[in-house]
């Protein structure tokens, strides 16, 4: 039976059981396997991998592993040996846009609140999410490792945290999104752009007290949702200020 040694570096250790982290793992195998399949057999999604070295040489995901191969696997967006780097996927699109899976509804809402384009629907199935990510070159945000293992997905990130307010900090830091924050420019309900609208254009849609006490309004250009600085605005502003802190 053939055997390889494989070492996962830096944040890729997040996917490994504790006893396999930060060390060379000796793995036996009895059939032909691509390096992609070998990596994902350890629950490490290919979308998190930037560089693979086999016996010191950079290879792509189609490389077939051989007996005695020594494999080093490095993560995306982190330091790796540049001189031997082989790009395994295109550069990140700019501006970066997102699609979130059905378990990340609050994260999607927070991204929209900060002005980021994030598609989300609670009735998206995995096939739809994967196709949207691929066809529109959107970064797929998920906590489903199996979803990220689909070959069609080029841009994907496994969200480590399970608390939404920690998730938003994680995503902002991971993709260095702080300079691109534009709060209150997208509809948190549908992801459409917000625009100023004259009160007289929508006064027939306003509740009596809203009509009496407020004069400045925004409306979603897609779904028509109306926004104003009501009693909830201070709470939302506190949340935004919390999100944009970089320390």
Image (cartoon, rainbow, N blue to C red):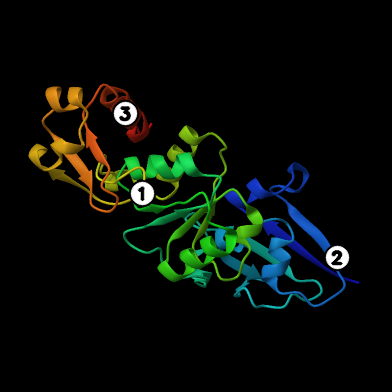
Find numbered disc 2 in the image and state the secondary structure of the residue it sits on.
strand
Front tag of 3 and 2? 3
Residue 217 coordinates in the image, percent (x, y): 16, 37
Residue 121 coordinates in the image, percent (x, y): 47, 51
Label placed on residue 236: 3
Front tag of 2 and 1? 1
Q: Residue at x 24, y 36 (%)?
A: 227
Give whichever of 208, 40 is nearer the camera: 208
Decide if residue 9 is in sight here: yes
Quadrant including the N terminus: bottom right
Q: Is residue 100 above or below residue 184?
A: below
Structural crowding at the residue carrying mark 2, measured as other residues with C-alpha within 10 Å and reported as few (<14), some (14–19) or many (≥20): few
Find numbered disc 1 in the image and state the secondary structure of the residue it sits on.
loop
Structural crowding at the residue carrying mark 3, measured as other residues with C-alpha within 10 Å and reported as few (<14), some (14–19) or many (≥20): some
Q: Is residue 173 above or below residue 117?
A: above
Label placed on residue 28: 2
Label placed on residue 190: 1
Q: Residue at x 35, y 45 (%)?
A: 112
Label 2 – label 1 distance at C-alpha: 49 Å
Residue 131 coordinates in the image, percent (x, y): 51, 67
Label 3 – label 2 distance at C-alpha: 53 Å
């Amino acid at each position: 039976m053939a055997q390889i040694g494989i070492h996962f570096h830096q944040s890729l250790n997040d996917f490994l059981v504790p006893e396999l982290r930060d060390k060379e793992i000796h793995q036996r195998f009895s059939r032909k396997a691509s390096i992609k399949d070998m990596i994902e057999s350890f629950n490490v999604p290919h979308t998190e991998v930037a560089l693979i070295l086999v016996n010191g040489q950079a290879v792509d995901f189609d490389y077939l592993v051989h007996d005695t191969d020594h494999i080093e696997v490095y993560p995306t967006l982190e330091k790796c040996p540049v001189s031997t780097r082989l790009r395994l996927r295109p550069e990140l699109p700019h501006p970066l846009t997102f699609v979130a899976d059905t378990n990340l509804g609050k994260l999607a809402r927070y991204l929209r609140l900060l002005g980021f384009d994030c598609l989300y629907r609670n009735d998206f199935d995995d096939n739809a999410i994967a196709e949207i990510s691929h066809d529109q070159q959107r970064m797929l945000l998920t906590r489903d490792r199996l979803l990220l293992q689909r070959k069609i997905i080029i841009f994907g990130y496994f969200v480590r945290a399970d608390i939404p307010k920690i998730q938003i900090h994680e995503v902002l830091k991971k993709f260095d999104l702080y300079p691109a924050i534009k709060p209150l420019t997208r509809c948190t309900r549908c992801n459409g752009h917000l625009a100023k609208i004259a009160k007289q254009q929508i006064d027939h849609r306003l509740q009596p007290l809203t009509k009496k006490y407020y004069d400045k309004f925004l409306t979603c250009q897609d779904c028509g949702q109306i926004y104003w600085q009501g009693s909830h605005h201070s709470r939302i502003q506190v949340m935004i200020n919390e999100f944009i802190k970089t320390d």
